[in-house]
Image: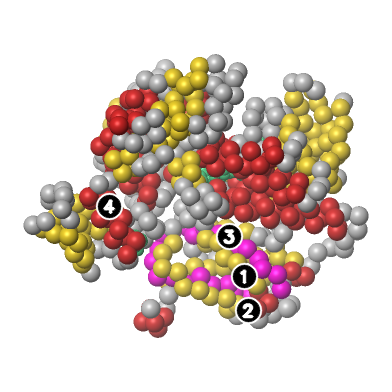
Amino acid sequence: MSAKIKENELPEGFKDIRCIICPTGCLVHVENVNGELIMEGHSCKRGEEYAREEFVAPKRILTTTMLVENGFLPLIPVRSDKPIPKEKLRDALKKIAQTVANVPIKMGDILIENVLGLEINIIASRDLIEI
Amino acid sequence: MKKYKVDVAVIGGGSAGLAAAIVVKKAELDVLILERDKELGGITLQCIHNGFGLHEFEEELTGPEYVQRFINRAKDLNIPSKLDTMVIEFTPDKTIYAVNNMEGLIEIKAKAIILAMGCRERTRGAINIPGFRPAGIFTAGQAQRFVNIEGYLPGRTFVILGSGDIGMIMARRLTWEGCEVKAVVEIQPYVSGLIRNEVQCLEDYGIPLITSYTITKIHGKERVQGVTISKVDRNFDRVIGSDKFIECDTLLLSVGLIPENELTREAGAKISQMGGPVIDNNLETTIEGVFACGNVLQVHDLVDLVTAEAKRAGLNAVEYVKERYDIKVEKKDQIICTFGENVNYIKPDLINRTDLSKDIIFTFRVKRPDRRLLIQFKDDKNKIVYKRKKIYVIPSEMIELKLNLSEHQIDPDCKRLEVEVIPRPEVLIEED
Ligand SMILES: Cc1cc2nc3c(=O)[nH]c(=O)nc-3n(C[C@H](O)[C@H](O)[C@H](O)COP(=O)(O)OP(=O)(O)OC[C@H]3O[C@@H](n4cnc5c(N)ncnc54)[C@H](O)[C@@H]3O)c2cc1C
Ligand code: SF4
């Protein structure tokens, strides 16, 4: 099975992407052939979409911890409220490591606004009270 | 000794205990959660990654977010809990003994008990490895707690034994914290956790997954200095000449989980061969009025399924207190559930004959991955009661089936039901 999709800004070359949508784990070959996206190996529409996104602009929700001062616990688990481009994950992690949060914190509180100018916020994953 | 009386006592305040307590409280019974930790939430609090809640909330949450929603609900409903309170014993007449700093030893008399104590990590597999017992050997869950809750790193360079989800998730987490994960070593020829975790936690960071290998020596006297890994053949015997040394200062074990059985066993409830307590289709253990749910019953990979199971346990405990508590019920007439080809265990262990016309939820796992299969339920006369096709099975994914057996013409005198997962016969393959 193959699918062709037109794109303006496609990365060069090819990638073999393992689909993670379901346990079948199809290996999808995605290749940019003269500005046209050729895909092979997926068994369904969801897999096609996933592999395409993974080739064009892979993103991940970032989950980590941030230091807190005077908290019931020394750390607060945090996440990005939207998926972050994969190549920006390291920088976002660095930024979070340099930040210290203040208690009390409620789940969903924005702890870093507009991280790296990506229009993505880093939010708290739980409530945290004072020590 | 301080004494309490409640309708339903819940032992363990993790995802399972919280969901069960909420259901009981909504049915307007008195409920009390007993939790040994200093806060409610259980293991999910340390699972800070996302991937929780797709079934329950239809969105992808982190572990803490998922359980915070239940903590908030419990708070809104004024559900009482005792924290820092460790249950040390319960008896078949449903008296619980627990200890805490404030009150010392306390006694709680309950009409029904819900067991929700979760599971513990296996350390088997490390016990037999030759070498000294240097510092620097942890379970993956311990390491997860250190890094995500207590805020320190247990080492710098890691090897992880076992490719379970917790181990793979920790591989990524440690990499993000600046540590080096040299390899994840798996004795089976396939990854034991989810493909999603293999891709997003290992492949994304170029961490090698070495399958059909195991650790055969731990080096170092004071502190781990490295491990020797060796290839194994189909029978898991070491292949001579395949040894490789990997330098590391810490070894993490991610070799599986087992239900926390101590209290349950000591109370005299039957424990299944493959893990948690023996239960009937109402999640009731062999002690009347004592129910089990969550990881203490069977190890779950999805917290959503834990929640669903816990709600059922809560409802059944309510039904027990309201309808059965005061009546002496005669011995139950039950059908035994067993497992055959490529099935590791099945829950429930017993089906009450009186419940045959109800929906029964069966859960089980396969022993090894396979494709193009048939899931079959057979009775004691080898008659097939139910069958269904399945494209793909792996041990890391629990299979759940809801069945109304009376709709499938089960022999009313049937004594035993066996589930098996077998290759699909040719004829059926052509049908797809
Ligand atoms: C490390 C790990 C990672 C996981 N990752 C995921 C994931 O990514 N996605 C997903 O959907 N699911 C995941 N799961 C599965 C899911 O989170 C768990 O199956 C679920 O949270 C278990 O809930 P529980 O209430 O049964 O157990 P727990 O959350 O473990 O709760 C048990 C509670 O009982 C308390 N307790 C135990 N004994 C006593 C006693 N004697 N007295 C008083 N209290 C006691 C414990 O302190 C604990 O709070 C993971 C599980 C583990 C173990
Ligand atoms: S392509 Fe479709 S069938 Fe294949 S793994 Fe992805 S979702 Fe599953």
Q: Nearer the viewer, residue B418 or B33?
A: B33
- Separation of marks 2 and 1 at Cα, in angstroms: 9 Å
Q: Which residue is mark 4?
A: A53
Q: Which residue is mark 2?
A: B408
Kindly identify the amino acid type of the residue bearing the numbered disc 2: His
SS type, badge 1:
strand
Q: Which residue is mark 3?
A: B363
- Separation of marks 2 and 4 at Cα, in angstroms: 44 Å
- Picture residue at 42% right of the left edge, 39% below the top: A81
Kindly identify the amino acid type of the residue bearing the numbered disc 1: Leu
Indicate whether A2 appears above or below B136: below
- Separation of marks 3 and 4 at Cα, in angstroms: 34 Å
The answer to whether the residue labelled 2 contacts the one labelled 1, judged by CB atoms less than 8 Å apart, is yes
Instruction: State the image quarter where residue B248 is shown.
Output: top left
The answer to whether the residue labelled 3 contacts the one labelled 4, judged by CB atoms less than 8 Å apart, is no
- Picture residue at 43% right of the left edge, 58% below the top: B394
Of labels 3 and 1, earlier in sequence is: 3
- Picture residue at 81% right of the left edge, 64% below the top: B332
